[in-house]
Amino acid sequence: MINSDYLKNLNKAQKEAVMHLEGPLLIVAGAGSGKTKVLTSRIANIIKEKKAFPNQILAVTFTNKAAKEMQNRVSGILGKTAIGLSWLGTFHSICAKLLRKHASAANLNSNFTIIDTDDQIRLIKNICKAENIDIKQLSPRFVLAIIDKWKNKGHYPSEVIINKKDVYEKTILPLYKTYQQKLTDLNSCDFGDLILHTVKILEFNSDIREIYSKNFKYILVDEYQDTNFIQSKWLNLLSENNKNICCVGDDDQSIYSWRGAEIKNFLEFDQVYKNTKVIRLEQNYRSSQNILSVASNLISYNQNRVGKTLITTMDEGDLVKLNCFKNGKDEAIGVSDEIEKKIKNKFSYNNVAILVRAIFQTREFEERFLKIGMPYRILGGTKFYERAEVKDCIAYLRLIHQEKDDLAFERIVNNPKRSIGDNTLKNIHEFSKNNNLSLERASIKMLEKNLIKPKTKIGLTSFINLLNKWRNDLEIKKFNHIKILQVVLDESGYSAMLKNKKDLENENRLENIKELLSAMKEFDNLESFLEHVSLATSIDQEWEGEKINMMTMHGAKGLEFDVVFLPGWEEGLFPHQKSIEEKGQNGLEEERRLAYVGITRAKKRAIISFSMNRFYQGDWIDSMASRFIEELPEKNLEKNSFFDEEPNEVDDFDFNQDFEIEEGTRSPGWIRYQKRIK
């Protein structure tokens, strides 16, 4: 039995979206505007008005979590009738269902296997090995990312037109051909194939296409701004007969172009689907008006958008706070102090979030929280000192400091690769145990006795010689503890491994290493730094109960918190320089949308901050406040006392000073910023 109350709690725009049942509909749903309620109420209304049976409704989401939430909400309205909604699910789950019914059209059997990422990597490794391609230089993950890009564009191998200037695409295309053939031979497909095969079947089999386009009298799509080309084409094919397609989303929250999302699907919806009705959901049920005003003013600087203005029934709320700090360490202290105030005012740790543009930014905050015993977690990522590349660097430093550190030796003796395999390491372990020697000493003795195979001997000898050189460099004070790590990374080949290997994650790894170098600046020598790391990682236990949430802004989409901190709003970092360099104005606008997403995660309090100086790769650099700060409306902001201080002349600034000083406003970055805002 249908619960008829589903229309009662809808506002005017929501009700209009639910009741409009003829023709294509684009619902521009602002952050926190109740789009899920609208989608579920719309499904209920279609069935109540007898416009379609449940199995004639296609409802598509991006995640299993979103699909489950929609199913539960619809069940709350429809009761047992909701069981008939057999076409409610994710893009991948629905395509898998379609593909199993018509597998033969894709040269598959209906019992085909969907392989996971690990299987994909293993398959690509085998193909690369057969083709004599060095996976140290061309990582399987990078190969798969390019293949996935082609699939998102709707291309089988024979349809790919490579970018002749891209040497990698020329190498990867033959791998794509072999990869697809292997999948067919294995009666398997990957996640990209689920949609690609289904689209090709619908596109080239008009009889199959007609069956489904006639059956689906209503199509509903969540988060439409995140669709890629192939997903949009799939929807277009399925809506060919009945044009009752309703897409819900927010172009101002389109932040995933790097994984194939095309905002033009949203912006050009009314051009693809003639006679489109556009309804804007501008009533926000999450944030205070000051937060919404700041977010709306910022996003208004984007040119490529449908346009909307968020309003709320809540009160004005606190002004959005804008804090300037002299350096990153002070920023972390300032944030922790502010959190302590909020906790005293009965806020929960669970309802506090720190949203960063890049994951390496968490380090300063982690250090601070560990020092003062403040519980935290990294959502969608790993804590700083647990990241593989950071642990590798620390292992090098530990072994240089203490040759008996067998755990460090094990971790780095073949990292990067030195032809030192598991069997060799096993033999070294055995020799070490029998002769009561450290692994390093055991290696030296085995080399002296010619107990190491010739191929392995070269790599192991080089490694031992480098360790001795680095220790000597430290002992004679040729390099300090910061410089020695830079030398180690260079001479060991570790930096080259990350820079030369085409791997999507290597940029983040390099940024984390640079941040590690920044952390070392705070210590006088290697011993004190290693002691700090040891204590930090031992203190860093899993706190029971509530914790502060730290994550990237990308990872925060769809979440909400009472209090949101947005640190690091500085040029080059946010907006990110790479986004602007690679995508120009489009990149800048996506960065601005990311800022909009970050601000609108806050329900009661948003605190934006930037630092005038940061320690980067062993040196202090002056920072410029993000251009986004100039786009925030003054009337909705509360600035900290830093903004009231008068800057000194730039000529008075000593670039070689130790930055542990009181007059933080003397930096050239601060002076330039003051000139811009006056």
Image (cartoon, rainbow, N blue to C red):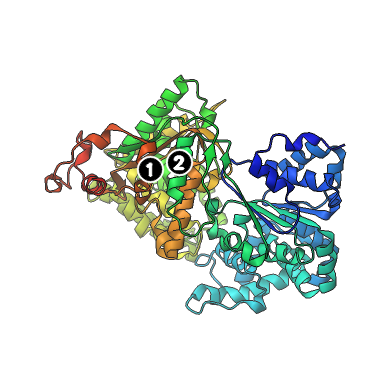
Residue 535 seen in render = no
Classify 513 as above or below 154.
Answer: above
Classify 98 as above or below 317.
Answer: below
Q: Residue at x 58, y 78 (%)?
A: 161
User: Could you tell which of marks 1 and 2 lies nearer the N-terminus?
Assistant: 2
Percent from the top left, x then y, of residue 657? 17, 43
Quadrant containing the N terminus is top right
Alpha-carbon distance for marks 1 and 2? 8 Å
> Which numbered disc covers residue 444?
none
Q: Name the residue under label 1.
A: 633
Q: In this view, does 649 lie to the left or right of 43?
A: left
Q: Residue at x 58, y 36 (%)?
A: 285
Residue 466 seen in render = yes
- How packed is label 2: few (under 14 Cα within 10 Å), some, or many (20 or more)? many
Percent from the top left, x then y, of residue 334? 35, 32
Answer whether labels 1 and 2 touch (C-beta < 8 Å). yes
Q: Is mark 1 on a helix, strand or loop?
A: loop
Amino acid type for the residue under numbered disc 1: Pro
Q: Mark 2 points at which residue?
A: 293
Amino acid type for the residue under numbered disc 2: Ser
